[in-house]
Image (tube, rainbow, N blue to C red):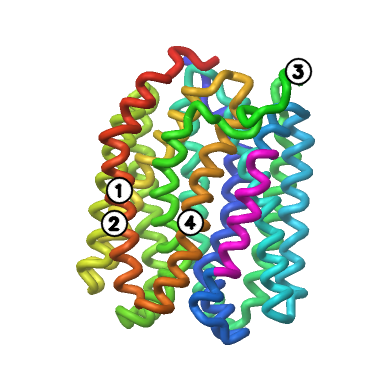
């Protein structure tokens, strides 16, 4: 059996960890920062933070095309460098408008570098271990999710200074950039696609139903990840549990990805996805229906378990539908779909919580999750089976 843990794969995973650490060390605290620093209302917080996702969403179709058409190493380094530089903007922003502009524009290099880095990871994986390797690759995201929010919240409580967090994010992103610089890619000639430009070059249209389906789950995660700290404080009186919540969620993600690696290697993609979406639904329902510490922390574990099964299965389904020269497009397509739901969730969460409260907001989230589960079992699973490629070298 071909070696999975080669040095370039490990380097790309390490860079991905640092990329997401820089992202997650700020994400759960930004609503508090905007509220405390600028006195921003919930609906305005949703608008400001959704700009990041909107920019990522806009850039990802182009980034998938570029990563498939030009030198992947050069594209990766350009994207990572710009992502790193933008952290200076948070430090310099002294008004809400300046912060909103910086935060929105920062979404573009984030959207591009996540596509570029994950596509490079696929390139350095042996074909026989690709499904399994993609599943493990996501553990670097999960490890960042487990560590970064807890560290960020701890440092903020210790210092009461958000500038310290911005500098930490900047330094970690810089280390990730240096790590990517050492990756050596297989010597492959860049094959120019001479076909006329079409939507297929920017988005994997033949996976359209998968895209719609995963957007439902992205919406739920958008609301939860951005408004968890405010909901915990205002509705449950839990003021120090956000870091623990993210850690438990990441434990669930870790456990499910490790447990699901064997079935992914065997190509059991729809089975993994089915298990994941059902467990996630239980988690989101428990989160809003059992409003105490037991329900709160148990939901984190269940949502983590669910997403850990569901997301890598969906990613492999996208890649299994794509041709070998469409891997960048497949990667950008699932991220576009997830981000579409995520951004809508951030915006919707802000508006609903402002006018109807957090409890009503998270019941809506559970409803969207249920619709996503229903769609998967009635439509999406059969859609994928019909379009799956037998071999995806």
| Residue 120 in view in this figure | no
Residue labelled with disc 1:
371
Verify CB contact (< 8 Å) between mark 4 and mark 2: no
* Residue numbers of the magenta segment: 47-62
Q: Kindly indicate the quadrant of the structure image that contains residue 294.
A: bottom left
Kindly state the secondary structure of the residue where label 3 is placed. loop
Instruction: Find residue 367 and name its label.
Output: 2
Verify CB contact (< 8 Å) between mark 4 and mark 3: no
- Decide if residue 163 is on the left or right side of residue 212: right
Instruction: Find residue 261 and name its label.
Output: none
Kindly state the secondary structure of the residue where label 4 is placed. helix
Mark 4 nearby-residue class (10 Å; few <14, some 14–19, many ≥20): many
Count of marks placed on residues: 4
Q: Which residue is drawn at 38% across and 25% down?
A: 384
- Counting residues from the start of the chain, the first of labels 1 and 3 encountered is 3
Q: Does 67 sit above or below residue 344?
A: above
Residue labelled with disc 3:
194
Pinpoint residue 370: horizontal percent, then vertical percent: 27, 50
- Counting residues from the start of the chain, the first of labels 4 and 1 encountered is 4
């Amino acid at each position: 059996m071909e070696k999975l843990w080669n040095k370039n794969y490990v380097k790309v995973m390490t860079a991905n960890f640092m990329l997401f650490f820089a992202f997650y060390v700020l994400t759960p605290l930004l609503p508090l920062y905007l509220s405390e620093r600028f006195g921003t209302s919930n609906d305005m917080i949703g608008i400001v933070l959704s700009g990041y996702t909107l920019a990522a969403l806009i850039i990802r179709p182009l980034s998938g095309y570029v990563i498939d058409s030009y030198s992947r190493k050069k594209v990766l380094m350009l994207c990572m460098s710009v992502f790193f530089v933008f952290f200076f903007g948070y430090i310099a922003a002294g008004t809400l408008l300046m912060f909103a502009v910086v935060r929105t524009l920062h979404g573009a290099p984030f959207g591009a570098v996540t596509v570029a880095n994950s596509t490079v990871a696929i390139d350095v994986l042996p074909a026989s271990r690709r499904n399994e390797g993609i599943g493990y690759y996501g553990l670097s995201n999960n490890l960042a999710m487990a560590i970064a929010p807890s560290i960020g919240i701890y440092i903020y409580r210790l210092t009461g200074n958000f500038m310290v967090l911005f500098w930490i994010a900047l330094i970690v992103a810089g280390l990730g950039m240096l790590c990517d610089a050492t990756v050596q890619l297989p010597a492959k000639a860049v094959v120019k696609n001479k076909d006329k430009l079409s939507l297929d070059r920017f988005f994997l249209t033949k996976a359209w139903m998968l895209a719609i389906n995963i957007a439902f789950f992205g919406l739920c995660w958008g609301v939860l990840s951005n408004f968890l700290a405010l909901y915990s404080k205002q509705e449950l009186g839990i003021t120090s549990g956000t870091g623990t919540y993210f850690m438990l969620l990441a434990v669930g993600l870790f456990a499910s990805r490790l447990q699901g690696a064997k079935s992914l290697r065997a190509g059991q993609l729809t089975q993994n996805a089915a298990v994941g979406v059902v467990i996630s639904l239980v988690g989101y329902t428990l989160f809003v229906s059992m409003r105490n510490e037991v329900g709160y922390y148990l939901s984190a574990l269940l949502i983590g378990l669910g997403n850990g099964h569901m997301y890598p299965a969906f990613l492999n389904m996208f890649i299994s539908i794509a041709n070998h020269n469409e891997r960048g497009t497949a990667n950008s397509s699932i991220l576009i779909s997830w981000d579409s739901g995520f951004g809508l969730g951030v915006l919707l969460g802000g508006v609903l919580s402002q006018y109807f409260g957090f409890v009503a907001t998270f019941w809506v989230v559970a409803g969207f999750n249920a619709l996503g589960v229903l769609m998967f079992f009635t439509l999406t699973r059969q859609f994928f089976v019909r379009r799956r490629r037998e071999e995806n070298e």
